[in-house]
Amino acid sequence: MRGRGAIATATRGSGDGPLKLALSRGALFSGALDLLDRIGIDTSQARGDSRALVFDVGELSLVTMRPSDVPTYVEAGAADLGITGKDVLAEQSDRAVYELLDLGFGACRMVVAGRRDDDSMGEAERRLGTVRIATKYPRTAERHFEQTGRQAEVIEVKGSVELAPLVGLADGIVDLVDSGRTLAENDLEVREEIATCTARLVANRVSHKLRAAEIDDLVARLRGVDR
Amino acid sequence: MIHPIPPGTRDILPEERRELRRLGLALIEAFERHGYGEVATPTIEYEEVLARGDEQGAPPAYRFFDESGELLALRSDMTIPIARLIANRYATAEPPFRLCYLATAYRAVRPQRGQMREFTQAGVELVGSPAPQGTAEVVEVLAAALDAAGLTRAVIGLGDADLYRRLLDDFGVGAEARARLLGCLAAHDHVGIETEVAGLDLSAAAAATLIRLPGMRGGPEVLEQARQIGGEISAPATARLAATLEALRERGVADRVSLDLGLVRDLRYYTGAVLEVYDPALGHILGGGGRYDELMGRFGRSLPAAGFALHLERLHVAQAEEGVL
């Protein structure tokens, strides 16, 4: 392992074994496993409450991680493929990975939301020419306001973003919404839709070239699933 | 007490330095055997001169002022400095020019992403030799360099920077959709391409060609597959790639190459063939290159040109992973 720790320029490729597939643990996890089951890959050992992070399931090795880490592992080649949400990919759009397939499941909306029956967002925009937006997706939020010709002061938070407008940290939020229940319970409502985000299959640049046949085969089978 | 160095830079200690030196020497010797002479250029240049090489501005560079207020920049690659060198020093000499280098370059990339801000490139420039023979010669030298490094499993991806643009022109795609599609292609966003094409009014063959071509990669059969999808509509765009492949066959290096109809490079001066180098042991590309037939013209001496640059530190990691050190 000569000097490897010092060489930050490259990550070892995943080599010649089974394809490594990075999976988001979280909202998309069971949907991804269901999809794999339907193309004939038995994922039962990855279900249940195992604390293990890597599962060998025959033709694939499943590597589980938090959703926002999937592009990191795939870009570096520590995983050949990955499944994560379009919200994550849009936020990390500078990551050099191939986006191969819209898997269709896990649809959520990326929205701008504000307090119900409260016009502090509009008020701030009129009086100050800018709004304060709290979000876990700062680049997506900045891009949205820039593309719609408005100014926003984007405040990045890590935890429950719904808190920010309730206590006056921000006038509104940009966040991913599934049923909208969390918004409703916090007296927030959707003001604008930015995008619909579904699960996507991504690939490492080198794996996409050197393991083309295996990857194309997997993509064809995933495409063939009746959704 | 620890005295920090900037992120994206590093010290190299004797054992690694010795291996890097051997690798660099092996590469330069391979280049010289093919008739390429080694040159060196200044690490710092006038920003205005480097910017001339790329009409949309140089990639993220380090810029600063000298004592008389001139704006200087650290070079971000060697292709533009060598274009300047040829325009200056060989202004009236008879082409072609075969030059090679082993040099550091600097880019203000975001740290913690596996990219260094100071790195070493080993590469060649062939100026004055047009496609397809010039391209094939460069690929031959690249294959020899990879062999000299012991990376016999490495693969050279070959694409064409103009291929998709030509298809969009041939199919009469409007300016806005064209820009969005090229944006998707550059971002490797094949889902976005599918969505965009679905919204266009195109024949079934044209739509299928735009959607499927970027994912087509492999041996010579790829060109045949492109024909099967789109009939003859993609033939003008793929003809140049077919000619390059034929020239590579004549030189006996075609089996080292994997065709890639979706290949694009992030440097904007590429005009025709583009190259990328992969090794199964490494998740990052080892280097790249291609044709830049318009670059020399911006320095006042219009000549067709091609070249490549290998990332020395990544080659070294690949050597370690492949067990060929």
Image (cartoon, rainbow, N blue to C red):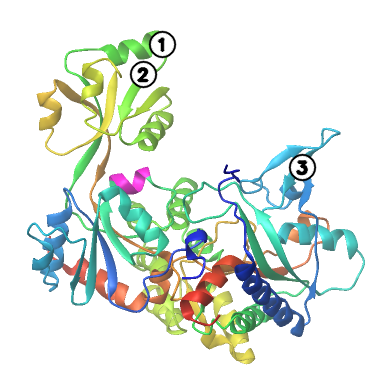
Give the CA distance from mark 1 to mark 3: 40 Å
**In the image: residue B322, left or right of residue A168:** right
**Which segment is the magenta one?**
A87-91
Q: Which label belongs to residue A131?
A: 2
Residue at 17% x, 59% y: name it.
A32
**Is residue B120 at all visible to an observer of this figure?**
yes
Most foreground residue, B86 or A71: A71
The kind of residue on which mark 3 rests is Leu
Residue B23 picture location, percent across and down: 64, 76
Look at mark 3 in the image and give the residue it sits on: B72
Can you name the residue that lies furthest to the top here?
A: A127
Q: Which label belongs to residue A47?
A: none
Secondary structure of the residue carrying numbered label 2: strand
Residue at 75% x, 85% y: name it.
B33
Provide the chain ID for the residue under circle 1.
A
- Type of secondary structure dominating the magenta stretch: helix
**In the image: residue B323, left or right of residue A152:** right
The kind of residue on which mark 2 rests is Val
